[in-house]
Image (cartoon, grey):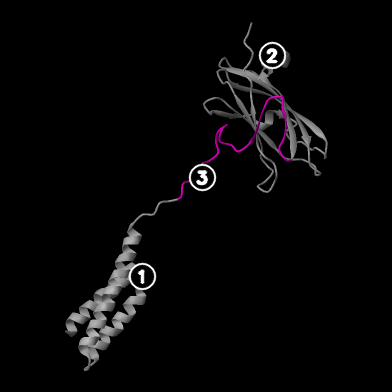
Amino acid sequence: SMKHNTKRLAAITAASLIAGVGASCIGPARAAIEDGMSSTKGGALHRQRALALSAAAFAAVALAVGTAATPTSAAAPTPVPGGANQVNALSGKVGDVLFNGVLRIQIQELRDATAADNPASMLPQADQKVMVMKVLLRNGTHADFTDLLTYTLADRDGVTFEIPSNLIKGINPHILPAGAARQSALFLVDKDFAPVKLIVRCATCGTGANFNAIRFTIPAPAPAH
């Protein structure tokens, strides 16, 4: 009947608006129903065609709603570098000379301070100790090197400590091609901090630079006699 067809048209239109899809099927169904309501010939054929198109439209809407309601599996998040073993870096040990595409870097010394280093000048507290780092840098490129390096220590548990840049002598280098420069630092750490890695990175090189981080393994201190 016309009343029944009108209700079906309203239901189809509402479903189309809610789901936002199935318009390609709803449109023909609506046209067929209206045609069926106004035509005096072949009414049964028009109604059958309208019902078939309506079913197809409802199926499209149901599929769209079901798809929207079903959560898709999100891509696994990229791990955030944050530890001595998570940083993508070249590897070596203290004393090695490693070339990272820009600099040849040698950690010449990384140890607890001795009396000759004048650790008292750092005013350590009872729960602190003073450490020493000495580095040799050689420029392996055809351009001057003037960027800021960072030095981060890490212990076996991944606890890190970045050596404050204001404590590093020569922190603002200007190294000519094939030239060299030294950096050194006297710094405080917790007395029970036992670093096993030193990660060297460039803070100002930019993403397009060829500077690769380097991870240096720190040898265990020799036992006291």
Q: Are marks 3 and 1 in contact (CB under 8 Å)?
A: no
What is the quadrant of residue 152 in the picture? top right
From mark 2 to mark 1, how far is it between C-alphas? 76 Å
**Residue 119 visible in the current orientation:** yes
Residue 137 highlighted magenta (yes or no): no
- Residue 38 in the figure: left or right of residue 106: left
Residue 86 highlighted magenta (yes or no): yes
Give the residues drawn in magenta, as a range: 75-101
Rendered residue at 68%/28% (across/down): 167
Quadrant containing the N terminus in the rendered view = bottom left
- Name the residue nearer the viewer: 189 or 56: 56
Q: Are marks 2 and 1 in contact (CB under 8 Å)?
A: no
Circle 2 sits in a helix, a strand or a loop, which is it?
loop
Circle 3 sits in a helix, a strand or a loop, which is it?
loop
Q: Residue furthest bottom?
A: 40
Quadrant containing the C terminus in the rendered view = top right
Q: Residues within 10 Å of mark 1 (few under 14, many from 20)?
A: some
Label 3 belongs to which residue?
78
Q: Which mark is residue 114?
A: 2
Rendered residue at 68%/42% (across/down): 204
Rendered residue at 75%/37% (across/down): 103
Label 1 belongs to which residue?
21
